[in-house]
Image (cartoon, rainbow, N blue to C red):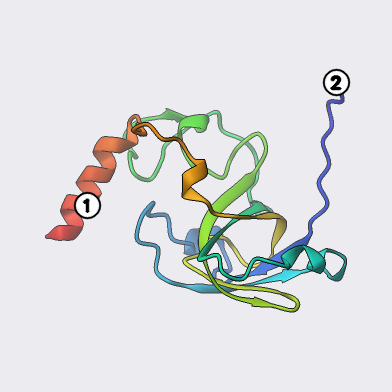
Amino acid sequence: MNRNVYFKPIGVIRSPYRRPEDAPRRPRGFPPAKATVKVFARYRAGLRDLRGFSHVVLVYYLHLSRGCDLMCQPFLDPKRRRGVFATRSPRRPNPIGITVVRLLKVRRDGLEVSHVDMVDGSPLLDIKPYVPEMGPRERVKLGWLEMKLRQLEADSDD
């Protein structure tokens, strides 16, 4: 097995967030910040037929992430250390981000999207249509996050 994996960016994400700490961290209710997804010319034919989808999944490189912490303190539970694979921390062995965003417009050179959480200049690795029916059919469990998300929702109802 080849130990090295290489990706070629297919574009770049232009968002209003200049630094990782500027980007929203709440798992729900991202502010509807808009971004432009610039797709490099050689990949633009792949945008064909995206019109009509309300959401897409952006896969991108967390280019400002430095280092890896296998144990981290997530912002939703800052008093406990959690395994990185049970969190959405950017300090991972392979700093790859995945976000579902609202698709506002398909342009000749890329996309206009909203509800973003990525930093400006993030190299785009892939775009996929979001299709909820392709997800699990059974009840999804959220582990330690379940209680934290319920607390967040209760706090926002106040």
Say left or right for 158 vs 109.
left
Say which quadrant the N terminus sits in.
top right
State how far apart marks 1 and 2 are (Cα). 45 Å
Residue 24: x, y in percent? Answer: 43, 60
Q: In this rendering, is residue 135 above or below 100?
A: above
The outermost residue toward the left is 158
| Front-lying residue, 18 or 85 | 85
Residue 153 bears which disc, if any? 1
> CB of mark 1 within 8 Å of CB of mark 2?
no
Say left or right for 12 vs 141.
right
Residue 136: x, y in percent? Answer: 45, 35
Which circle's residue, 1 or 2, is located before the other in the chain?
Answer: 2
Q: In this rendering, is residue 20 above or below 143?
A: below
Residue 21: x, y in percent? Answer: 49, 59
**Disc 2 marks which amino acid?**
Met
Residue, x 56% and y 69% (percent of image)?
A: 52
| Front-lying residue, 21 or 52 | 52
**Disc 1 marks which amino acid?**
Glu
Q: Residues within 10 Å of mark 1 (few under 14, many from 20)?
A: few
Residue, x 60% and y 37% (percent of image)?
A: 92
Q: Secondary structure at mark 2?
A: loop
Q: Residues within 10 Å of mark 2 (few under 14, many from 20)?
A: few
Residue 1 bears which disc, if any? 2
Q: In this rendering, is residue 62 above or below 95?
A: below
Residue 10: x, y in percent? Answer: 79, 59
Residue 102 bears which disc, if any? none
Q: Secondary structure at mark 1?
A: helix
Residue, x 49% and y 62% (percent of image)?
A: 23
| Front-lying residue, 131 or 19 | 131
Q: Residue 67's quadrant in the figure?
A: top right
